[in-house]
Image (spheres, helix red, strand yellow):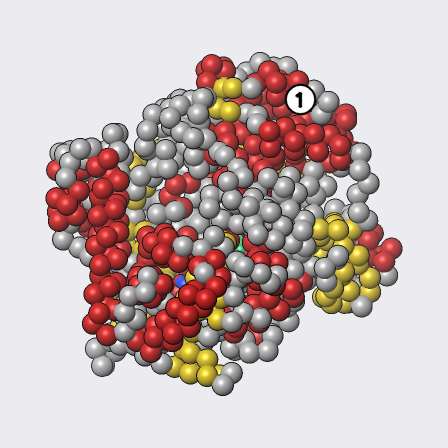
Amino acid sequence: MADRVAFRTCPLCEAGCGLEIELTTKPDGSEEVKRIRGDQADVFSAGFICPKGSTLKHLHEDPDWLRQPHVKRGGQFVPVSWDEAFETIAAAVGPLMDEHGRNAVGVYLGNPNAHSLGPMLYNKGLLKTIASRNIFSASTVDQRPKEVSAAMMFGSVAVPVPDLDRTDYLLMLGANPLASNGSLCTAPDFPGRMKRIQERGGKVVVVDPRRSETAEVCDQHIAILPNGDAYLLAALANVLFEKDQVGRLADHTLGLDDLRTRLAPFTPEAVADRVGIDAETIRTLADELAAAPTAAVYGRIGTTCQEFGTLTSVLVDVVNLLTGNLDRVGGAMFSCPASGHPTSKGEPGTGRGFRMGRTSSRVSGTNATFGEFPVTVMPEEIETPGEGQIRAMVTVGGNPVSSNPNTVRLDAAFASLDFMVSVDPYINETTRHADVILPPPSPLQKPHYDLALLQFGVRNVANYSAPVLPLAESQMDEGEIIRRLTAVFAGDAASGPEAQAAADAIDDFTAAAFAGAATRDTFSNVAGRDATEIVEATERTGAERLLDIALRTGPFGDGFGSEDRGVTLEQLEANPHGVDLGPLDEERIPGILRTPSGKIELLNEHIEAELDRLGDTMAAEMPEMILVGRRHVRSNNSWMHNVRVLTKGRNRCTLQIHPDDADRLGIADGGAAKVRSRVGELIIDCETTDVVRPGVVSIPHGFGQNGEGVQLRVASEYRGVNTNILTDEYLRDPITGNIALNGVPVEVAPA
Ligand SMILES: Nc1nc2c(c(=O)[nH]1)N[C@H]1C(S)=C(S)[C@@H](COP(=O)(O)OP(=O)(O)OC[C@H]3O[C@@H](n4cnc5c(=O)[nH]c(N)nc54)[C@H](O)[C@@H]3O)O[C@H]1N2
Ligand SMILES: Nc1nc2c(c(=O)[nH]1)N[C@H]1C(S)=C(S)[C@@H](COP(=O)(O)OP(=O)(O)OC[C@H]3O[C@@H](n4cnc5c(=O)[nH]c(N)nc54)[C@H](O)[C@@H]3O)O[C@H]1N2
Ligand code: SF4
Ligand SMILES: [Mo]
């Protein structure tokens, strides 16, 4: 019997499932987690959970999860106090920045930042204080093309999501939600939502070079050649233009006729060879999309992490527009997050739109997008001497040496740094290079609100989780870690009461900035009010205070008394299963558009150049073998292989290869293959299977935690290799510099 039951949103992936956590009290009065299940009463996930969700207990109890700061002395990590850790950082970065300037410090913000309330709220201040131009994040190994596409078309990072619960037809490209549980589309129980499309008579079509787990359960799988999506979507648009179904949005769109002309060469017949799909199938697909009562096109990693990432992302929404399904129930819609929307300020036509090229990187002149350089230039910026060379790195919740391309080169670059600090719980491929590690508490010890991911919700919901378990004496709240680190970079005290006071001042400053921004927003429910009064009206501190301000001044908020009722943090605390704010609204356009024209902008110089390139490469010869990635439901990027209940069983880090290719190359099922790309080579176990199309091989990422100095007892035993030994940092989406992790030319031979 449980002594207490707590409810919490799972922070591990974008689905954000509600968890029911049973705890018992031990004789010493402390609590222990007994069991974790899906929370049946959760307003969004209704009991759904994947195998990872129940492992928060294992993460919390993992002996390799650091529970106090560590500093490297004589090549060994030793535990130290927080004050000592921050003093060590201050002693190194102060002189380093004095001598070499602020650009000598590089920052990498990794994936878990999007799932952690403290960093989400305080990282901005940290970056501003470090004031370096060398900022990198997981966004350019993942989604930057989608963000830039939205910024180009809609004027802000308002990414349309498929209205899964009401659509009649879902066309999904390069996504495998049965493994990933969905991305840039927050939909707990994505598999169940897909199934219900089928149950109500709808159709689900999956476009993927691999017959993925999702393809297995869909109505039609189309095995495309890697990187073929832009051609396919261009051909679909080409056919759809003839059907004239844009409807209401035609008046709110700029460049429709020009785009029609530009897409004219991309007929289904013209692209068929390049995409590996016959013209008839493409035409039928276009006809079905046009005929379905409602339809949504959705593209993910297989479409963003490839050479035509931004163009493909634009074309996904062009097809949604051409079928009349953009911004319409059952189509591709815009979420309205309770914490405020990126487009909430200003009026249509008042935005600056997407502009490129204001900053370019020192070594290769690569463009920054949204104030960040793509990770693809990180190695050259660390290696190349001269003014502005990166000599120190700060990583927060990231494992780039595992997750970024050409990992061998990046590993050597990290090893050459003068100084490195990591906010991270583990000693892994990346943090082994750190001089100081500042570990966050476990997910069960943190407050949670999905500030980032609810921007992509297929429903509007709000769900706050208080920490389930208290911090140990030796631990520090993650928001506090970021504030203390910020104080160090600001040159404030690194230890003692003065350091605490500096961190508190940063908190107050951030709260004032949040409230100030809300009162200056003409559309806000607190417009024109006094910001100080708003800060004082919340009786909280830290992340909870910022969250309370964001929620109460957001589109569903109580406006600190301006509205009779509305979302507040207090209300969310009283509703541990979340608050449902309803399905997404249609006809948000033109209201949410922030492009300079106030319209959906379809073309610009970047997209035009990409369309030219698309035409130029249509007949290009394909490499003999092409590498793509995949995920497994029991793993999570590079960091959950230390949980034994997830990694047990057969080796999942295999090269999937078609039997015809295996025969031709002399590779036996279960045998080993040597895979080589422009940048590296590795040896891997083979799995001969017709799930991949001939000419395509697939390797999952996030494996290979067996390097020297890695302190992950379970993960290091795993028989895996890192596929990013093969991925090539110079294979990029040209607009964003985002890495093309999919579509890497490789040679495969028996090992
Ligand atoms: N080949 C290939 N490579 C890929 C991909 C692919 O499909 N193929 N996918 C890419 C994608 S989509 C992404 S998003 C990136 C992700 O790559 P990264 O941004 O590097 O993120 P993770 O691999 O998730 O690593 C997470 C790090 O954060 C630490 N961590 C875990 N929890 C917390 C926490 O609560 N707080 C803090 N501070 N740290 C924490 C972990 O110990 C680990 O070091 O990988 C990319 N790499
Ligand atoms: N279990 C688990 N869940 C996760 C993660 C994890 O590591 N493990 N990572 C999380 C993160 S950070 C993210 S970003 C999401 C990603 O979520 P998804 O985008 O769903 O990612 P994947 O499951 O890798 O599915 C991508 C699919 O694209 C296909 N593909 C590859 N190249 C191409 C191509 O050129 N065209 C087309 N059409 N398809 C192609 C691959 O074969 C693969 O099936 O998952 C999140 N959820
Ligand atoms: S799908 Fe799994 S990992 Fe993702 S939020 Fe739900 S339980 Fe957590
Ligand atoms: Mo990701």
Q: Where is residue 22 in the image (x, y as percent from the top left)?
A: 30, 65
Pointer 1 local density, CA inside 10 Å: few below 14, some 14–19, many at least 20: some
Is 413 above or below relative to 460? below
> Closer to the camera, 553 or 235?
553
Q: Position of residue 428 (x, y in %)?
A: 52, 71
Q: Which amino acid does label 1 sit on?
A: Arg
Q: Residue placed at 82% from the left, 65% from the top?
A: 750
> Closer to the camera, 218 or 381?
381
Q: Is residue 386 left or right of residue 3?
A: right
Is 616 above or below relative to 215? above
Kind of element beneath mark 1: helix
The image quadrant of residue 412 is bottom right
Q: In this view, does 90 lie to the left or right of 378?
A: left
Q: Residue placed at 65% from the left, 60% from the top?
A: 406
The image quadrant of residue 440 is bottom left
> Which residue is identified by label 1?
262
Is 343 above or below relative to 631? above
Q: Residue placed at 55% from the left, 78% from the top?
A: 709
- Number of numbered discs on residues: 1
Q: Is residue 335 visible?
A: yes
Q: Can residue 107 be seen in this view?
A: no
Q: In this view, does 443 lie to the left or right of 641?
A: left
> Closer to the camera, 410 or 558?
410
Q: Is residue 565 left or right of residue 741?
A: left
Q: Residue placed at 85% from the left, 58% from the top?
A: 665
Farthest-out residue, bottom: 74
Q: Quadrant of the N terminus?
A: bottom left
Q: Position of residue 123 (x, y in %)?
A: 37, 55
Q: Quadrant of the C terminus?
A: bottom right
Q: Position of residue 332 (x, y in %)?
A: 48, 30
